[in-house]
Image (cartoon, rainbow, N blue to C red):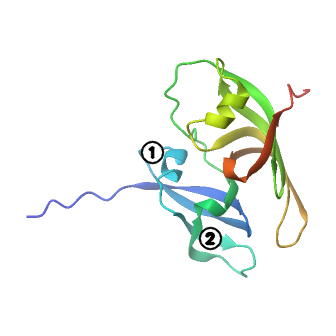
Amino acid sequence: MSDAAAPTLHRLVPVRVMTDAGWVAGNVHVPITRRFLEAWRQGHAFVSLTDAQVEGLPRPIPFFAVHRTAVQFLLVDDPQPLEVVVSTRPFREHHVTCLLASGRIMGILRVPQDVRLSDYVTHQETGLLVLEQARVDVRDPWSQALVQLSDQRVVVDPRAVVGISELGPSPR
């Protein structure tokens, strides 16, 4: 009698990914026991998307693998927190702008209160920057049209960031 492992149950998390070549949208299959960022960081060179919409193709395709190093940022539509916060340290919200080759993203970056923003960005542990309540202003690589999105949860790959600065508190 074989001890076959039970199949892993997944939930679908819709994402829109800005790559060096343009937008890709689809679903990431996240094990129900994991948070999105934990699954995203699995370490494979490619991330699998299902029911993918690839810029330039006339209709969705069942599967598309996107290379991690081509990802500038992604918009994540997941009602759950993106990661498990294991730190009990208090956080401070920093209003930042990230300059990318395709445009800019402004939003709120949570940083441990006892860490300077510059140190966090330079040495942050997650390998990704999570901006809440973000405004995205980027050029679409295919059409060159300006894409503007507001009130987004954006995960930015620091390798795509040309520069980052604190804006100070935003007026409300």
Residue nearest the viewer, comparing 38 with 30: 38
How far apart in space, not on screen, are marks 1 and 2 (Cα)? 22 Å
Q: Earlier in the sequence, mark 1 or mark 2?
A: 1
* Residue 47, image x, y percentages: 54, 62
Residue nearest the viewer, comparing 60 with 107: 107
Figure check: 89 above or below 95: above
Amino acid marked by disc 2: Ala
- Element class at badge 1: loop
| Image quarter hosting the C terminus | top right
* Residue 48, image x, y percentages: 53, 65
From the viewer's perspective, is 102 left or right of 92? Answer: right
Can residue 157 be spotted in the picture? no
| Residue designated by label 1 | 34
* Residue 67, image x, y percentages: 59, 65
Q: Which mark is residue 157?
A: none
Amino acid marked by disc 1: Arg
Crowding near the residue tagged with mark 2, few <14, some 14–19, many ≥20 C-alpha atoms within 10 Å = many
Can residue 52 be spotted in the picture? yes
The furthest residue to the bottom:
58
Q: Quadrant of residue 34?
A: top left
Q: Quadrant of residue 71?
A: bottom right
Figure check: 61 above or below 67: below
From the viewer's perspective, is 82 left or right of 34? Answer: right
- Element class at badge 2: strand
The furthest residue to the left:
1
Point 80% across, 35% down: residue: 96
* Residue 29, image x, y percentages: 50, 58
Q: Quadrant of residue 103?
A: bottom right
Figure label count: 2
| Residue designated by label 2 | 52
Crowding near the residue tagged with mark 1, few <14, some 14–19, many ≥20 C-alpha atoms within 10 Å = some
